[in-house]
Image: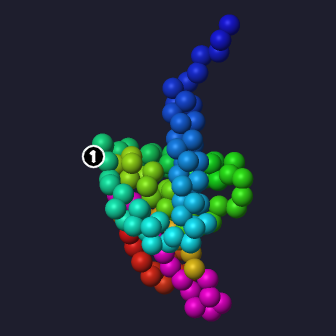
Amino acid sequence: MTIPQRPEANAMRLLVLKAYLSLIKFDIYLRRGNFSSLYERVRTYPISRRLFQEESIERVCDAVNMASIWYGKEVLCLQRSAATTCLLRRHGIDAQLVIGARPMPFKAHAWVEVNGRVVNDKQYTPAVYAVLERC
């Protein structure tokens, strides 16, 4: 006897797999020291024409977080944010990768915003870091 699978659970598994593969792809860019290619990939990633539902933002962020847990090494904020941005755009959401820095002590950070709202980090993140770039 087989146990019936819920369609939502299968969809989430697929989304986590896509997130995991995106983490691998952006990890390769970073390991090669190819920041410009990573940046260009995110900047030019198309926004799907499909209509999105508000809960899609949370589902994508949850999937990336889950994939990050299973990833074999530490996931960097730039890697995680690039993957999140592209997955959100794939779901029809106009997401932006934001890169910021603070001077003392120096620290750089990346996060994702949708309509000016941080979606994959703490809401006060833009107040801590000066925005250097959005794509």
Q: Could you tell me residue 114's position as x and y percent?
A: 40, 61
Quarter holding the N terminus is top right
Q: Could you tell me residue 98's position as x and y percent?
A: 45, 71
Left or right: 95 in relation to 100: left
**Magenta part of the chain:** 94-107
> Which residue was labeled with disc 1?
49
Q: Which image quadrant is residue 43 in? A: bottom left
Q: Residue at x 56, y 72 (%)?
A: 33
Q: Could you tell me residue 36's position as x and y percent?
A: 45, 72
Q: Does residue 117 appear in this view?
A: no
Residue farthest to the left, as pictured: 49
Q: Residue at x 57, y 43 (%)?
A: 16
Position of 16 relative to 121 (above/below):
above
125 or 25: nearer the eye? 25
Q: Main secondary structure of the magenta part?
A: strand
* Label 1 packing within 10 angstroms: few (<14), some (14-19), many (20+): few
Amino acid bearing label 1: Arg
87 or 45: nearer the eye? 45
Residue farthest to the bottom, as pictured: 104
Left or right: 70 in relation to 6: right
Residue farthest to the top, as pictured: 1
Q: Residue at x 63, y 48 (%)?
A: 66
Position of 5 relative to 89 (above/below):
above
Q: Residue at x 64, y 53 (%)?
A: 68
122 or 92: nearer the eye? 92
Quarter holding the C terminus is bottom left
Q: Could you tell me residue 128's position as x and y percent?
A: 55, 81
Instruction: Say which element carries label 1.
Output: loop
